[in-house]
Image (cartoon, coloured by chain):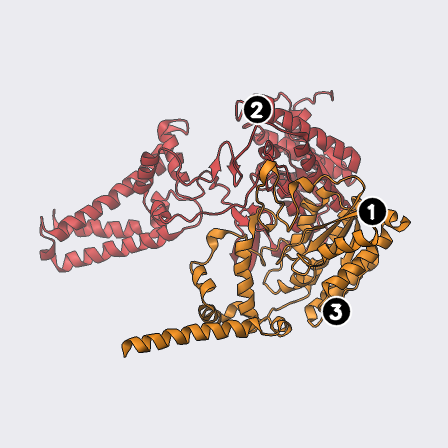
Amino acid sequence: MNSMFLVALLILTAVVSYPEIYDLIAGLESMLPKPEARMRLAQSIGALAAAFLLWLRRDWFLQGSFPYRALMASLGIVWLELVLRLFFKWIAPLFGSASAIGKWEHSLRQYCSTMGEMSWMDPRPHPFLQFTAVRWTSRGERGLGFGNITVSRIPKPTGVVRVACLGNSTTFDNYPERLEDFLNRCGGGLRFEILNFGTGWWASVHTMLNFVLNVRDFHPDFVVVHENCNDEKFRGYAGLRGDYAHAIRPLRLWRYRDAWLYRFSLIYRLGIILVSKQFPRVYYFPHIGVAMNRGKTPDYIPGELQLFRRNIATICDLAAAEGIKVIIPTMPFSKLHRYTQFDETRFHPHLLGANAVLRELSNEKAVALVELERMFMDKDSFFRDGFHLDEVGVGIKALEIGKTILCSLGIDPVLDAQWREVELSKPPVDPAP
Amino acid sequence: MLYVDLLAGAVSIVALEFFLRIAIKRAPEESARDSPQGFRYAMRDLSRQLELFTATEPHPFLQYTRPRTLLVGGDQRYGFSSIKLSDVPKPAGVVRIACIGGSATEGGYPELLEAFLNAALPARRFQVLDFAVDGWASVHSMLNFILNVREFHPDFVVVGDELRGAGCSGYPCCCRGRVHDYTPLAYRDNPLDEWMLRASWIYRACKILLVRSRIEAFDRDGREIQQYRRNIETICTLAALDKIQVILLTAATTNHDSIKAVNETIRATAKARVALLDLEQTDDRIAAERIGKMIAGMHPGARAE
């Protein structure tokens, strides 16, 4: 091959391998850059050095010589990697997520993280909450593990009504942001601040302990406790204990020695998928869950719901002692969307039982109840899956909770055009049985 | 000659190891405790950490407990000295006392307290449950009270948290989630040189001297005491709702400024709502007797006898 062409190709390789350019045109890794960025920079510098060497000493790279073959092999791998990445980044999405190519693209993106299917949440172990999202530190600021909630936000600004939203993925799903929008638009001129403490996979025990340890620090005026669905995961274990250690274990992040390689090389990642045929960096087991013990059985006992009751009651009691108003929405769910073949026999009875506990507690502790279960019962079109609402449903949830907060403050909400539209999309509520 | 030199070197190392162990072991306890930035304190602290790794089990919400071993017949050790899963249902006619705290409580006065009460009031049966774990601070005790202790429906809870609540302070940030102080306990994170740390105190000493920054003096700003107070108040609030009587104990060691501050906090908390027992400068036996007398005076059934 013409040596001038080879020099040009090497310079081009150096340019595209520059980490930020490479990430822009062929990046398939989620989260912050990791060792692959440094390796890509080394690749860029290496290509530039090879181009320089080739320019100076053409006689070292005669066709058929070892340096020539090594150079061509390296370039071949680098460009094969780049072409594959370009295909999966720009062309594969055109096939749709349901297609085989779409599924490959999804797998490849998941494989860039040791957390695999949990990479969207990127959990970090916590000594008292099992796990939270990343507790970042940046320029003297410290995140508490709940998105943009930081230590510096603890002091409450004057004149602000603060609402803390507690729960799991059904709180993490953006309803708190919609709630803030509703309250600030339709809340009679009051300023509202919403803090989203929702964490995917959490159950009532995590939420209760987070209320005890963190949420109270923020001195919220209201706390919305949206729990139920994930408590089912901890049912059916032998040796029921108040601290859930019979079912839950501490989350440990496993350090994989090849983490640098599977983030750096898509070819390697493809190799893992082809060889193992399943996700090898397993944190999530469909029938077990995240950081849970083995041994789940179909034998649920009422005592397990008593722990759910205790957790929510503890929040209500401690909130009352600090003058915080509690709002409890019931958990809406779809009977049409299914997770397992046991949904009718185990999951739905659990959801109904836990919602009944919430109604009892609402009466017993005199806290506001938002009846979402009855509102969305048999309205399957509002659901993304078994219990996650779609965008319209999330808007309705925010509206209903928002109206309850305003009602509690003695404010009659004045809906603007956008929220009137949400009001109109509400399904008719079935009368209470 | 080379063999003689090697032998002399080996004997010197063994002798140094031996004398270092004796020197640290026989160092007065109080002097070591008085200077957290001191070398002897660091050596003892490292020993304690190594022991904790072997005698504890990680927990998802309490950081760690004692091993929760499965027993025959489906029973299980609950993670505390002598408590089992089968102890949860309260036997009829028993006055149950839960003792929570850290090293000053675990394996100390609770056993003596049970013996004292059962001897002093033979007509009633008293059961004392020791929920303390060495190394725990008030945050652990509070969470343990919320998650476990209440499930045992005690009539009394004796709160003996004093030292660690203040001793763990001094970290930047100071959020109540306490992640600025504590990390999850994970055996995988054991240092690679754990075997060497265990085998050789010379190695341990070298490591401490080289990593001096880890044992700097604490920089406290008072917020830690506020957190301590809040943890104790949370126990008191929930105990009142469950009709559990709370007895707060002050720390028995007072020659440390932060412990004095903790004791003042305990007195202030108790003044408002619960019983207080000033235990300054007493040993386990005297403590057990004084707590026992207080319980005997507080329990309506016991008073009637």
Q: Which residue is label 2 attached to? A: A343
Colour that chain A carries in the picture:
red
Q: Is residue A423 left or right of residue A81?
A: right
Give the letter of the orange chain: B
Position in image of residue A314 (x %, y %)? 72, 43
Give the quarter of the image for residue A319.
Answer: top right
Q: Which residue is label 1 attached to? A: B124
Chain of residue at mark 3: B
Chain of residue at mark 1: B
Q: Please name the amino acid that badge 1 sits on.
A: Arg
Assign the N terminus of chain B to one quadrant of the image. bottom left
Q: Is residue A244 left or right of residue A327?
A: left
Q: Residue lying furthest right in this view? A: B304
Position in image of residue B266 (x %, y %)? 76, 61
Q: Which residue is label 3 attached to? A: B281
Separation of residues labelled 3 and 1 (CA atoms): 30 Å
Q: Please name the amino acid that badge 2 sits on.
A: Asp
Q: Secondary structure at mark 3?
A: loop
Give the quarter of the image for residue B77.
Answer: top right
Separation of residues labelled 2 and 3 (CA atoms): 60 Å
Q: Nearer the viewer, residue B155 or A150?
A: B155
Is residue A426 at least partly visible in the picture?
Answer: no
